[in-house]
């Protein structure tokens, strides 16, 4: 392998965004007939690096050669001409166009636009690899996996032989993932060079021939997958030997706090998102919610928070004295007026939980600005709260007058969580609270959540990392396609069993 | 009895400047540029043509006017003037990524001022005692219709009685509709307006498309100004006479849900609504006529409301309309 | 070694942030360049000496005490309308209907003056005028807002069309109430009795200036320190965040446009009751559109708007002076205004972005 010319050779690639160094003198080789897994934590610069290969960004420094020839990739078009095709995590598709139109987009084949012919070729590619796509279907009518299929066909249609896939499995069911992997192996055997960006170790072990690791924008090393193991890869990813040990104090005096009964929710387009969901969340306990992404986690939390219209069922809040109050049909304001202190850390931190362009102090006001009788807002206490949050949670920020969009992901999350727990909630909802955070920030967040639990708060924790869920949660509710697949005790639960329940209703040993 | 035979031709000549403006703006908006400078562009288009024609008529004297040059020179001047406006808009909004609304409004201020200033100067140069310039010789060339049209009765009057620019407007509209719907360029342009990110990733030069669509759109819109002066107004330029047709053309774009082929009929409908008050007998009550003039605007509002209530995916504006694109945005 | 080893010639990156003196330095430079460009345009198109033209402009705006008063009165009206559109813009509601909202305020004022002049005491008449103008403007602003809130109807176009509906409504009443019959205009209302004319403070200009000064301070407080102002900012930045914290977005949209329209109505009251004492279809004179630029140039800050509106009024008044002094057309001012605006608009780019040129041919940096 050593004497082969790499299909892509990247040397000393550096890219900065303002003060942030996303890639720092990175070296990377990509070979044909090989699947390379580009491994790294979120924010380690994997996507940025590949974006420079596909012409989205232009490197500040460094050289790229293709098949031994030095090249300059100024635009995605240059990348296509060199046979490089990238399937982005956020699909680059135009919603109002059809699959076929999206596939030929940007191609300058001679002759007039003949969508019939395009559709024919698309069907050919579909047949060759076992895809199922209607070339005339509009993108906005498609499911996530169909959209991904269109993206892959788009790249193949252009005859790309260097394929880059950015976290392709994040949105797929296990079956869909298996199918995708089979296709990728076929392509490798076809002599194509394939890069898959991921942070899931089992995918690396399952699929790749070689693995390259990035950490904090720097290239740490690469090696054949066969010669390494999960522990070594983790160490390389995070920089020091990590023991995945999260505290799990015993629940204190758990009492039912939120009772959900037969909850059914449909999205605006009429798709069934939650189907007859029932469970109880207790005070002083962390209820973990597991499931493949898009299985109704978001709708569930938003329904409890009063942000999601509900078709049927009930959500009641149970006071300490056992009194029940219905939450359905109330908006967040009405829920707060009832005296229910409910905090919600949403998935979309800057688009929903915070206002990106406002500074820390103004963001602290989001929850509290209505306080006081006067016409004017109280500016002093949010400023004080901001200072407290910065000090307590070690938020790295130039000042509390800095717009939160300028902060790094971990600090943004600390600001958001800090604000949400400042109101002394009795219920805390968190969605993907540690997504995109480095290990240290993640542990800070786990710690904060545990402290809330010990203070008697009912915590509902939606997570994507099963290992974390298994170590953190007292009980785990598993969702599968909007239905409750089962509820298991966190202590002693097996990852394999929970994984099974995520993909198939009931799994095999659902208790309760 | 309502006099359709005289109503329809008048509605059409009213509608043609709107059609030019609407087609041009549709192209522009398909690329994601909301050009509120359209009224200014149409003014500049009109006055540039007038300047060209004026200089030509002055140099040869109105007797020696050559039919071809009399049409060609104003046409080129008009296209050039509006092209420059388009380039200015693109430079500010695409290259410098300025706010499109403000840039557009500034262009309208500038364009209308430009038109009226040079209009005023020419009026002074020509030494006329009325505040307008008449370019009757040039206008005659623009207005020339088929010689046998007048022999064909109502048919000739409704379909064949217009100057060539009117037919050009209809042809351009249909060509634009075809290009947008059926060709690669149109597909790419739609992608740029919907999602410049995606288009860029697909290897489409987003800025080039934005420049092209906006500049061509401005040139088409400029022709609307030219048609108004040379054909509709019989070669008479008077300041502010063009009025708010530019804004009306902007409204028409939304009214026609970004379809130039629909615009052909909608512009005639608008033209009709615009002059309906002349055909409705109101007796001596002049005040009521002013209320009838409200019609095109009220109809636009109603259509706007209904289309927003129906909220069909295909009938929405291009998704990135009004937003500047920067590839490395984070 | 390789000929094609070249990055793009210019490379543009977003700036982190510029210190305030940096950004204002760039803006000052842009205005300076704009003045040079205007001078060039002036010389080329008119053959006049640009210095003389600028001197004439300053003379036109501030040459005499009376001219200065009129300039400040015009600033007051433009500023008032600019203040009116600002809450909506902060909410990202593109209200370009200030023209119509002001006009309808004018019409309401004039109607009261015509219909109630002899029927109620003057103080009551003035109270009714104030209420009518403000309510009329508010309603005119509220109509598009309701549809925006309910069905997300495009507000830019809706408010634009409402301008023309207002214009035609005024045109209707102008003919309905025309004096004398057939004149096509209303003329000065209650010229002899001066009924419904707003009282004067010292001279006939000061009242509007004082009223608008108060509105400026109030608007500044409203936008920056009130709960409403905070809600407007949140809705403008992110509707999802607003809903997440329980802000009723629909309510905020409608309420903000009511405020917007009401302040426009107030401008209409000042125009008709305090200054012109008549109503015509062109009484607002495009200020509704100019206000958009005033507001934007000032970054939606009411205090900065004092200066941006002064700049634009200065250009307009100066242009009027050039027109008479040099026999130029009044529209020349619009051209100059346009050029200056282009420069200011364009310079924002250099505040937000940094351009780095590729270093000379060497391949290593």
Image: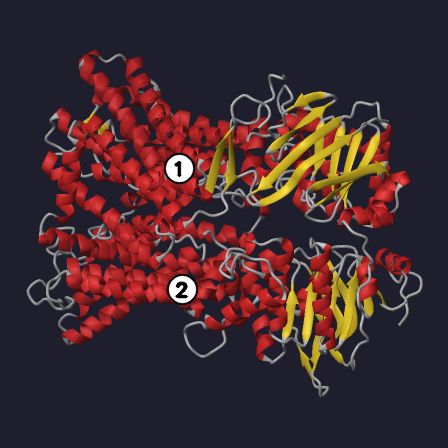
- Which residue sits furthest bottom? A321
- Residue in the image at 62% along x and 58% along y: A411
- Residue in the image at 36% along x and 24% along y: B79
Name the chain under label 2.
Answer: C
The quarter of the picture where residue A191 lies is top right
Q: Is residue C105 left or right of residue C202?
A: right
**Which residue bears the numbered disc 1?**
B268
- Picture quarter with the N terminus of chain C: top right
Q: Is residue B58 left or right of residue C340?
A: left
Q: CA distance from mark 1 to mark 2?
A: 48 Å
- Assign a secondary structure to mark 2: helix
Image height of C352 relative to A388, above or below: above
**Which residue bears the numbered disc 2?**
C224
Name the chain under label 1.
Answer: B
- Residue in the image at 14% along x and 55% along y: C69
Say which of marks 1 and 2 sits in front.
Answer: 2
Image height of A395 relative to C327, above or below: below
Applied colour scheme = secondary structure
Please state which of residues A156 and A195 is positioned toward the viewer in this rendering: A195
């Amino acid at each position: 392998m050593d004497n082969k010319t790499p299909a892509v050779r990247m040397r000393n690639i550096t890219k900065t965004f303002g003060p942030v160094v996303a890639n720092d003198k990175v070296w990377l080789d990509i070979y044909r007939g090989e699947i390379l897994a580009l491994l790294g934590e979120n924010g380690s610069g994997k996507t940025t690096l590949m974006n420079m290969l596909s012409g989205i960004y232009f490197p500040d420094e460094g050289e790229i050669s293709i098949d031994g020839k030095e090249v300059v990739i100024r635009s995605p078009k240059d990348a296509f001409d060199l046979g490089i095709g990238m399937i982005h995590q956020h699909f680059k598709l135009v919603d109002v166009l059809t699959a076929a139109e999206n596939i030929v987009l940007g191609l300058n084949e001679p002759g007039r636009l003949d969508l019939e012919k395009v559709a024919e070729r698309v069907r050919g590619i579909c047949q060759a690899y076992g895809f199922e796509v209607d070339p005339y279907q509009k993108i906005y009518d498609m499911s996530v996996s169909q959209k991904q299929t269109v993206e892959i066909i788009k790249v193949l249609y252009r005859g790309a032989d260097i394929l880059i896939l950015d976290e392709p499995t994040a949105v797929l069911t296990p079956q869909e993932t298996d199918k995708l992997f089979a296709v990728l192996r076929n392509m490798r055997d076809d002599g194509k060079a394939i890069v898959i960006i991921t942070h899931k170790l089992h995918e690396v072990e399952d699929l790749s021939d070689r693995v390259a690791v990035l950490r904090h924008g720097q290239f740490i090393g690469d090696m054949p997958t066969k010669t390494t193991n999960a522990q070594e890869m983790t160490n390389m990813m995070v920089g020091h030997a990590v023991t995945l040990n999260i505290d799990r104090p015993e629940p204190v005096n758990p009492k039912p706090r939120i009772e959900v009964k037969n909850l059914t929710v449909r999205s605006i387009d009429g798709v069934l998102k939650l189907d007859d969901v029932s469970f109880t969340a207790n005070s002083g306990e962390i209820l973990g919610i597991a499931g493949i992404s898009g299985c109704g986690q978001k709708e569930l939390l938003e329904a409890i928070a009063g942000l999601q219209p509900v078709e049927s069922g009930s959500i009641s809040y149970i006071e300490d004295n056992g009194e029940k109050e219905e939450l359905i049909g109330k908006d967040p304001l009405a829920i707060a007026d009832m005296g229910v202190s409910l905090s919600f850390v949403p998935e979309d931190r800057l688009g929903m939980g915070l206002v990106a362009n406002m500074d820390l102090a103004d963001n602290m006001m989001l929850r509290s600005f209505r306080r006081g009788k006067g016409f004017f807002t109280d500016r002093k206490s949010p400023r004080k709260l901001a200072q407290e949050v910065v000090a307590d949670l070690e938020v790295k920020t130039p000042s509390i007058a800095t717009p939160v969009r300028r902060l790094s992901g971990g600090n943004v999350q600390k600001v958001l969580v800090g604000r949400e727990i400042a109101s002394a909630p009795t219920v805390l909802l968190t969605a993907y609270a540690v997504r995109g955070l480095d290990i240290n920030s993640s542990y800070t967040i786990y710690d904060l959540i545990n402290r809330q639990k010990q203070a008697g708060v009912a915590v509902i924790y939606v997570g994507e990392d099963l290992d974390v869920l298994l170590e953190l949660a007292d009980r785990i509710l598993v969702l599968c396609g909007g239905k409750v697949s089962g509820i298991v005790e966190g202590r002693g639960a097996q990852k394999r069993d929970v994984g099974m329940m995520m993909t198939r209703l009931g799994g095999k040993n659902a208790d309760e | 009895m309502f006099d359709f035979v005289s109503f329809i031709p008048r509605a059409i000549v009213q509608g043609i400047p709107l059609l030019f403006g609407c087609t041009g703006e549709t192209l522009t908006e398909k690329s994601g540029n909301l050009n509120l400078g359209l009224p200014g562009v149409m003014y500049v288009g009109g006055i540039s043509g007038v300047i060209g024609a004026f200089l030509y008529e002055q140099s040869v004297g109105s007797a020696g006017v050559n039919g071809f040059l009399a049409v060609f020179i104003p046409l080129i001047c008009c296209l050039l003037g509006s092209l420059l406006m388009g380039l200015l808009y693109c430079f500010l909004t695409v290259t410098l990524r300025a706010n499109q609304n403000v840039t557009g409004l500034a262009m309208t201020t500038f364009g209308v001022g430009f038109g009226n200033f040079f209009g005023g100067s020419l009026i002074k140069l020509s030494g006329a005692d009325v505040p307008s310039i008449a370019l009757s010789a040039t206008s005659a060339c623009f207005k020339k219709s088929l010689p046998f049209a007048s022999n064909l009765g109502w048919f000739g009057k409704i379909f064949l009685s217009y100057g060539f620019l009117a037919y050009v407007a209809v042809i351009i509209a249909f060509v634009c509709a075809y290009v947008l719907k059926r060709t690669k360029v149109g597909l790419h342009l739609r992608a740029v307006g919907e999602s410049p990110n995606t288009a860029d990733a697909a290897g489409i030069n987003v800025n080039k498309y934005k420049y092209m669509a906006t500049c061509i759109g401005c040139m088409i819109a400029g022709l609307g100004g030219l048609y108004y002066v040379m054909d509709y107004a019989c070669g008479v330029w008077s300041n502010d006479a063009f009025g708010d047709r530019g804004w009306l053309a902007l409204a028409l774009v939304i009214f026609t849900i970004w379809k130039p082929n629909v615009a052909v009929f909608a512009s005639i409908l608008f033209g009709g609504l615009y002059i309906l008050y002349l055909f409705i007998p109101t007796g001596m009550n002049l005040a009521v006529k002013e209320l009838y003039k409200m019609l095109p605007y009220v109809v636009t509002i109603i259509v706007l409301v209904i289309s927003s209530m129906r909220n069909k995916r295909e009938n929405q504006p291009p998704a990135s309309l009004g937003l500047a694109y920067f590839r490395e945005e984070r | 070694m390789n000929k094609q080893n070249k990055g793009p010639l210019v490379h543009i990156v977003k700036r982190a942030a510029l210190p305030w003196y940096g950004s204002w330095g760039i803006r000052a430079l842009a205005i300076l360049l704009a003045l040079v460009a205007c001078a060039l345009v002036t010389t080329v198109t008119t053959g006049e000496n640009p210095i003389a033209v600028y001197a004439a402009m300053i003379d036109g705006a501030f040459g005499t005490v009376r001219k200065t008063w009129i300039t400040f009165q015009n600033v007051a009206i433009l500023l008032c309308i600019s203040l009116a559109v600002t809450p909506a813009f902060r909410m990202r509601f593109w209200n370009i209907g200030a023209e119509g909202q002001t006009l309808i305020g004018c019409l309401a004022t004039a109607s009261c003056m015509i219909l109630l002049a002899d029927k109620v005491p003057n103080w009551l008449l003035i109270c009714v005028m104030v209420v009518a103008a403000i309510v009329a403007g508010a309603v005119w602003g509220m109509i598009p807002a309701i549809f925006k809130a309910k069905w997300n109807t495009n507000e830019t176009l809706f408010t634009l069309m409402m301008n023309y509906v207002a214009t035609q409504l005024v045109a209707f009443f102008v003919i309905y109430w025309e004096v004398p019959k057939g004149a096509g205009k209303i003329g000065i209302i209650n010229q002899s009795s001066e009924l419904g004319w707003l009282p004067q403070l010292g001279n006939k200009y000061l009242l509007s200036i004082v009223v608008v000064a108060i509105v400026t301070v109030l608007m500044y407080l409203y936008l920056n320190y009130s709960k409403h102002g905070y809600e407007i900012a949140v809705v403008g930045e992110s509707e999802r965040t607003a809903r997440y914290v329980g802000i009723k977005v629909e309510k905020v949209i409608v309420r903000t446009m009511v405020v917007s329209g009401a302040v426009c109505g107030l401008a209409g009251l000042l125009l008709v009751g305090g200054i012109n004492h008549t109503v015509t279809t062109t009484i607002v004179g495009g200020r509704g559109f100019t206000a958009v630029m005033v507001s934007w140039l000032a970054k939606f800050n009411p205090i900065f708007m004092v200066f941006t509106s002064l700049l634009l009024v200065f250009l307009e008044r100066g242009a009027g002076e050039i027109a008479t002094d040099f026999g130029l057309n009044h529209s020349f001012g619009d051209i100059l205004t346009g050029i200056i605006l282009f420069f200011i608009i364009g310079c924002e780019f250099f505040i937000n972005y940094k351009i780095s040129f590729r270093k000379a041919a060497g391949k290593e940096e």
